[in-house]
Image (cartoon, grey):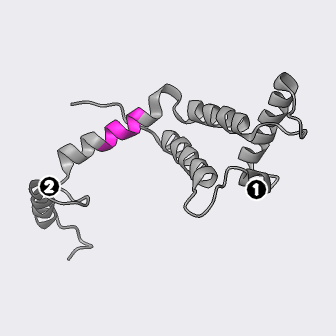
Amino acid sequence: MKVAKADEKEFDKVYDFINVMDDLFDSRFFSHEEEWRNWDDDDEDKKLLLEIEEEIKETDGEDVWGDVDNRLVLYEFIKRKWKNANWCGSFQRIVTDAEVLIENACDPDLDYLEFKPEIREAMEEYDKNHKTNEDE
């Protein structure tokens, strides 16, 4: 089976998406949905959130307290981050790559990633028969 291989840029974008979602929505102790306002002013995600907030303020106006509904800001932010991270199907490609590799190369009897016994044996046999000067 041949499957398109995700590249490093795709992994970076997906990790970026996952990390910022964790920062926003890690609610084990309390809600972090407004915490983005405390992020460093040089943070690219904070800059994007502020830009989105201004766009919403211009198109939808402010509420009675002079604020923009943070839920609208976060929704638009997540939508943009998702589109960036999932450009041309990156999430699907990464998940498919992992699934194919696990199914084809990993021991199905273990609950952690380890090569199938026949692959391990072939690697050990190869190493035994192809020693380099450094190995001696």
Is 15 left or right of 3, judged from the image as shown? right
Where on the picture, by quarter, is residue 17? top right
Q: x, y (%) of residue 105?
A: 20, 49
- Label 1 CA crowd tier, 10 Å (few <14, some 14–19, many 20+): few
Residue assigned mark 1: 39
- The chief SS type of the magenta part is helix
Q: Which residues are magenta?
A: 92-98
How crowded pointer 2 is (Cα within 10 Å; few <14, some 14-19, many 20+) is rated as: some
Q: Is residue 18 above or below residue 39?
A: above
> 76 or 83: which is nearer to us?
76
* Quadrant housing the C terminus: bottom left
Residue type, mark 1 in image: Trp
- Quarter of the picture containing the N terminus is top left
Q: Nearer the viewer, mark 2 or mark 1?
A: 1
Q: Position of residue 78 (x, y in %)?
A: 62, 37
Counting residues from the N terminus, which is met first, the one under dot 2 or under dot 1? Answer: 1
Q: Secondary structure at mark 2?
A: loop
Q: Which mark is residue 130?
A: none
Residue closest to the far top: 59
On the image, numbered disc 2 is attached to which residue? Answer: 116
For this orientation, the residue located farthest to the front is 64
Q: CA distance from mark 2 to mark 1?
A: 45 Å
In this rendered view, identify the residue nearer to me: 92 or 127.
92
Does the magenta segment cover residue 117? no
In the foreground, 38 or 118: 38
Q: Position of residue 128 (x, y in %)?
A: 12, 67
In the rendered image, the vertical position of residue 113 relative to residue 95, given as above or below: below
Snapshot quadrant of residue 103: top left
